[in-house]
Image (cartoon, grey):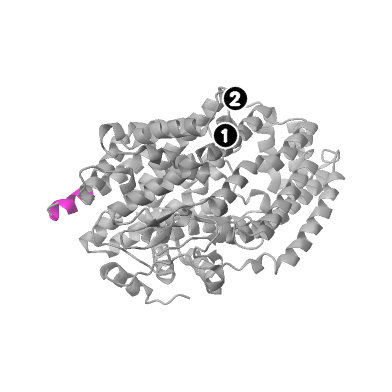
Amino acid sequence: MLNKTGIFIIMAALLFLAQANLTAQSRERADIEEKYKWNLADLYPDDKAWETAKADLAQKIDDVVAKKGTLANSSADLLNGLNLVFALQKEYGRLSGYAGKKFDEDTRNSQTLSMKQELQQLGTDFAAKTSFIEPELIAVDKAKIDAFLKAEPGLAIYAFYLNDLQRRKAHMLSEKEEKILAQASLMASAPYDIYSVFSNAEMPYVDVVLSDGKKVNLNLANYALYRASTNRADRELVFDTFFGSLAKFKNTYGQQLYAEIKTHMFYARSRGYNSSLENALDSNNIPIDVYMSLIKNVNNNLDTFHRYLKLKKRMLGVDTLKYSDVYTPVVKGINLQFTIDQANQMVLDAFAPLGKEYTGVIETAINNRWMDIYPSPGKRSGAYSSGGAYDVHPYILLNFNGKYDDVSTLAHELGHTMQSYLSNKTQPYPTADYPIFVAEVASTFNEALLINDQLKKIKDDDVKLDLLMNYLDGIKGTVFRQTQFAEYELAIHEKAEKGEALTGEALTQIYGDIVRKYYGHDKNICIVKDVYTNEWAYIPHFYYNYYVYQYATSFTASTALSEKVLNKEKGALEKYLAFLSAGGSEYPIDLLKKAGVDMTTPEPFVKTMTAMNRVMDEIEVILKKKGM
């Protein structure tokens, strides 16, 4: 249990800002206390136990082959076959979780890379040997499937899966063709795998000397840290150097990304989809209009985004806002720093409206080493929550540097963790994995709770301004920036699908046109240097096949839902917790409708823009009071 006096420590950190720097610099993993590293023994005691489990799974996979041709014989045969396959899939998820996290601890480690690669090969073998299942099930008449469901109660947990197969019947292939696609997955991961190793472990990032004489290697973690420098010359140096480094390898990055896009095209065309976008969205039954409407809505509201940029320019006191200015704190003298213990208490306080059961699980995550907290050389950059080990618990990877953004990231990843935990606890394995479309709702919901809690406690105008701008920065990063990425992703896929080549130069040109439109470069709102248009090479999400738009749609959904909960609207909390516990038991659009938000309408986006303008109005009032 955390110290209950933590809130007073937090408030002291907020109000007495001249404290010592608490930022956690990258350190060797061996020098980090065990309590700040995740405990992978909850998955397997050691690598030897993992190897034993992997070998055991490899043997059991052959048992699936014996089920070929039997699934439609009776409801009992169908149940036995599905139980076997899903049980093996569950064990594979646990194996994958262990190997992936061991690799992410140090992407330079060839042994853990080998473990990851071995498991990928096993996964390909598993997919190939089970490739007969879906064609065999699709060949069964829907009336017979319905009769099996009625006759065998045990099949109820597979009802959604079986019915969804019928929906996607037109895009399912023969057994032989499905086997070929399954085998192709062994190659399909190559573009991202190469990108990840190159970017995290082998890219020759350049050293810079900052204005205080400090020498810094601008790797991924340090770029993310020092781009927010309060010294304008330093942050411009960081931007120029980092993106200049990427520019030297843009042909390599371009080939990697082009290879990824061709992979998406291969799968889409193999299954008879009109585009990669249609293929990507159909897996969760998302209407293409949802994607296109998001881009349209954001483009129609760029004036609101530009209002935010003008506020940033005004508060920074600069004649011209540059792209290298967008991450720096806008309130002079404010440099909020937090220890991880303070951050933990902040999120626990913020999540109180969700109930004691919710916060109790968070305390367990903190105290039982579900998290890997600090950056270290070779560690995977960024942050994530992984809930794939159904019978264990979720894990969180962080690169905590003591900034408010890092606290917000903690809240964000805990949202994913709680959705995974509650879904795994409530749902049977076949429906526990929630669809990607709703994956970012719980995370951004938690960020909204955090900022709301902090703003209620802060009285100092400067600190309040800082946090209000941090909230706007979140909307910038989640709604506008991710939609900018989504528009870029659509543009480069469409170009490739027309048969046009995608070189590093072409990828840079397309990205530059879009980013300059969003930031009002031609209107002199925010100037984007040529070298910064290489930023596309920095974004790993372009390898995730139309993932990024869901950050924006989820944010708009969570804005609507969090306001309902915080306003104590009748039934809102219960509906939200039910949503977190629903896993993938329904299509995402339907899950959100039950929670209280309809993503096929513009209402969630409108509410988000209203909230954004309301915050900017509040900032204007404070600035006027301060005579700024």
- Number of marks in the rendered image: 2
Q: Which residues are magenta?
A: 618-626
Give x and y (percent) for residue 441: 47, 49
**Point 70% across, 68% down: residue:** 46
Q: Is residue 622 magenta?
A: yes
- Tag 2 near tag 1, CB within 8 Å: no
Residue with the most extreme left position: 627
**Point 78% across, 45% down: residue:** 125
**Residue 597 in sight in this render:** no
Q: Regarding mark 2 in the picture, which secondary structure is present there?
A: loop
**Point 29% across, 57% down: residue:** 230
Q: Residues within 10 Å of mark 1 (few under 14, many from 20)?
A: many
**Residue 480 in sight in this render:** yes
Question: On screen, 360 above or below 68?
Answer: below
Q: Is residue 124 left or right of residue 382?
A: right
Kindly identify the amino acid type of the residue bearing the numbered disc 2. Answer: Asn
Q: Regarding mark 1 in the picture, which secondary structure is present there?
A: helix
Kindly identify the amino acid type of the residue bearing the numbered disc 1. Answer: Tyr
Question: On screen, 15 above or below 169?
Answer: below
Q: Is residue 486 left or right of residue 584?
A: left
Give x and y (percent) for residue 536: 47, 40
Q: Nearer the viewer, residue 606 or 39?
A: 39
Disc 2 target residue: 274
* Main secondary-structure element of the magenta-colored stretch: helix
Give x and y (percent) for residue 198: 57, 49
Q: Is residue 509 left or right of residue 395?
A: left
Residue with the most extreme right position: 66
Q: Is residue 503 magenta?
A: no
Q: Residues within 10 Å of mark 2 (few under 14, many from 20)?
A: few
Residue with the most extreme top position: 498
Disc 1 target residue: 258
